[in-house]
Image: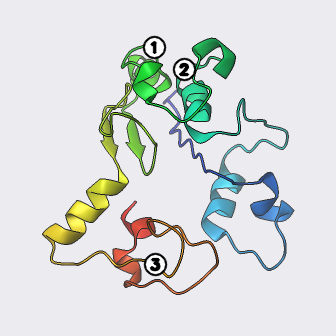
Amino acid sequence: MPQPNIILITADQQRYDTVGERSPGWMRTPHLDQLARSGITFRRAYSDTPICVPARCTIMSGRHAFNHGMMSNRRSSEVLGSTGTLPYRMGELGYQTLGAGKMHFEPYRARHGFDDTLIDADYHIEMLRNGHQPQPMRHGLGQCEVYPGMATVPEALTYTSWT
């Protein structure tokens, strides 16, 4: 039997009631809804910590924040190496692993067991290499809009499309 493909999506400040049938009627998340319908979702999942880097270290190490010691946003390399992490273990099982998007790893290009990574800085480098000046959004940081709005670049050039 072939191994299943696995996509693990993490999002900062993503409430359980913002996807699928649990979301308000005005909210549209068709791609996340499709992933939820074809995969596994958790109705009662809790984060070990509400802070992003410690939460990611918990997922990557399989240890509670009190055990791995990352209790604030610090250098992930203080807790994570390149062996013993979730992507490293997945690699031992024959999976190819890719970390994509904003992961808050430090040092910035740390892989922590991933075969490869595509990080937000790579998007900006590729935009500049292809002659496109990255455009700031109207509000928010790094094309993370606080409120819905029209993109400041064509859809094909957005960070979301690139990712």
Which marked residue is nearer to the observer: mark 3 or mark 1? 3
Asked whether the residues under the numbered discs 2 and 1 touch, taking CB atoms below 8 Å apart as contact, a structural biologist would say: yes
User: Residue 28 location in percent, x, y?
Assistant: 70, 74
Q: Name the residue at 30% across, 61% down.
A: 123
Q: Secondary structure at mark 2?
A: helix
Dot 2 alpha-carbon crowd within 10 angstroms: few under 14, some 14 to 19, many 20 or more: many
Few, some or many C-alpha atoms within 10 Å of disc 3 (few <14, some 14-19, many ≥20)? Answer: some
Q: What secondary structure is marked by label 1?
A: loop
On screen, residue 81 versus residue 18, left or right, reads: left
Of residue 107 and residue 158, the one placed in the foreground of this image is: 107
Sequence-first tag of 2 and 1: 2
Q: Position of residue 88 (x, y in %)?
A: 41, 21
Rendered location of residue 152, percent (x, y): 42, 85
Viewer can see residue 111: yes
Amino acid carrying label 1: it is Gly
Residue tagged by mark 1? Answer: 84
Q: Could one spot residue 80 in this view of the protein?
A: no
Q: Is residue 117 left or right of residue 71?
A: left
Query: Which comes sooner in the sequence, label 3 or label 2?
Result: 2
Query: What's the mark number on residue 163?
Result: none
Q: Which residue shows up at 35% across the image and 79% down it?
A: 135
- Amino acid type assigned to the residue bearing label 3 in the image: Met
Residue at numbered disc 3: 137
Q: Quadrant of residue 73?
A: top right
Asked if residue 8 lies left or right of residue 111, the reply is right
Which amino acid does the dot numbered 2 rest on? Answer: Ser
The Cα–Cα distance between marks 3 and 2, rounded to whole angstroms, is: 34 Å
Query: Measured along the vertical axis of the image, is residue 98 above or below residue 129?
Result: above
| Quarter of the image where the C terminus is located | bottom left
For the residues bearing labels 3 and 2, Cβ distance under 8 angstroms:
no
* Residue 61 circle label: 2
